[in-house]
Amino acid sequence: MITLTNLTKRYGDAVAVDDLTLTIEPGRVTGFLGPNGAGKSTTMRMVLGLDRPTAGTALIDGRPYADHRYPLRKVGALLDAKALHPARTARAHLRAMARTNGIPGARVDEVLGLVGLADAARRRAGTFSLGMGQRLGIAGALLGDPEVLMFDEPVNGLDPDGVRWVRELVRGLAAEGRTVLVSSHLMSEMQLTADRLAVIGRGRLITDAPVGDVIAASERRAVRVRGPHVDGLRALAAALSARGASVEDVPGGLLVRGAGIEEVGETAHRLGVLLHELSPQEATLEEAYMELTADSVEYAAEADR
Ligand SMILES: Nc1ncnc2c1ncn2[C@@H]1O[C@H](COP(=O)(O)OP(=O)(O)O)[C@@H](O)[C@H]1O
Ligand SMILES: [Mg+2]
């Protein structure tokens, strides 16, 4: 479990993380989302003791990172995949990490196999592609068989196979009861990977909720109706608009926002409008996310403002 309490980080006048209170529970994947510069990486660095909080605390199972005797056996992290010695081989890099944490050397070859780098074990890390670097970083995170895992943008540079592999790996780790925190800016991928979302903007918590709840709260969610009689649909659209819903014409029917499916169905019934379809249209996580973070995007294009 990761516990952030009033966690704050300032760099000079700039606030990178602003009074963040959040618990990341075991047994599920928590997606850590936010626009560029929201403070995700800074938060993860503070959990790992790489950055000192200006105020507040970041604890792993109730203690700061540095207070764990063998930190790599408690928490594994992929933060910056390029943070390794380019002249070292993949195996030498992991062996050095293992030695300082009392991890047996045999575990190195095990994790190299797990991430699909067994054949590249003797290659210098500096010659690795971005995707191979990510895999080596993930191997390092898994090395100590830790209960808590943090992955910062783990699918950057991975091909579709690699993306899927990370998704299954991360879901598997949570299913084993581990605490898993994954940041990403790929919403479609997060919708498939995460159970719960912590969304931040400008260092502040915007939402902490199950993925399904975040999507259900979106104003983009709609009800679609189709019917064979244009006049009937017109009458339905007028009645729903009069009740404050927003109604859009779509081929063969209407898309209604701001009214529940019961209200749409009952209104059609009252007006005697024949329907061939009455269906809920879920928003995508991307749409829900855009609404949530609209006010906190640091580098929005002028046209978006
Ligand atoms: N070492 C640093 N010195 C000064 N500002 C920093 C430093 N690291 C991060 N920041 C600033 O803190 C904010 C949060 O950055 P970061 O945690 O990297 O965001 P994210 O990972 O969500 O994109 C940004 O405005 C960034 O410019
Ligand atoms: Mg980052």
Image (tube, helix red, strand yellow):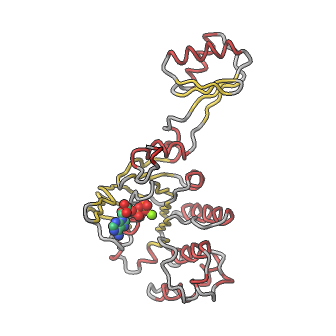
Locate residue 196 relative to residue 12 in the image: left or right: right
Give the vertical position of 290 relative to 123 (above or below). Answer: above
- Write down the quadrant of residue 278 in the picture: top right
Q: Residue furthest front?
A: 302
Locate residue 285 relative to residue 298 in the image: left or right: right
Q: Residue furthest right?
A: 228
Which one is nearer the viewer's eye here, 21 or 203? 203
Q: Residue furthest top?
A: 271
Locate residue 283 relative to residue 207 in the image: left or right: right
Where is residue 27? Give x, y as percent: 51, 59
Where is residue 29? Give x, y as percent: 52, 58
Where is residue 20? Give x, y as percent: 33, 56
Image-quarter location of ligand 1:
bottom left
Q: Residue at x 41, y 77 (%)?
A: 71
Q: Is residue 2 visible?
A: no
Q: Residue at x 61, y 61 (%)?
A: 167
Q: Residue at x 44, y 84 (%)?
A: 101
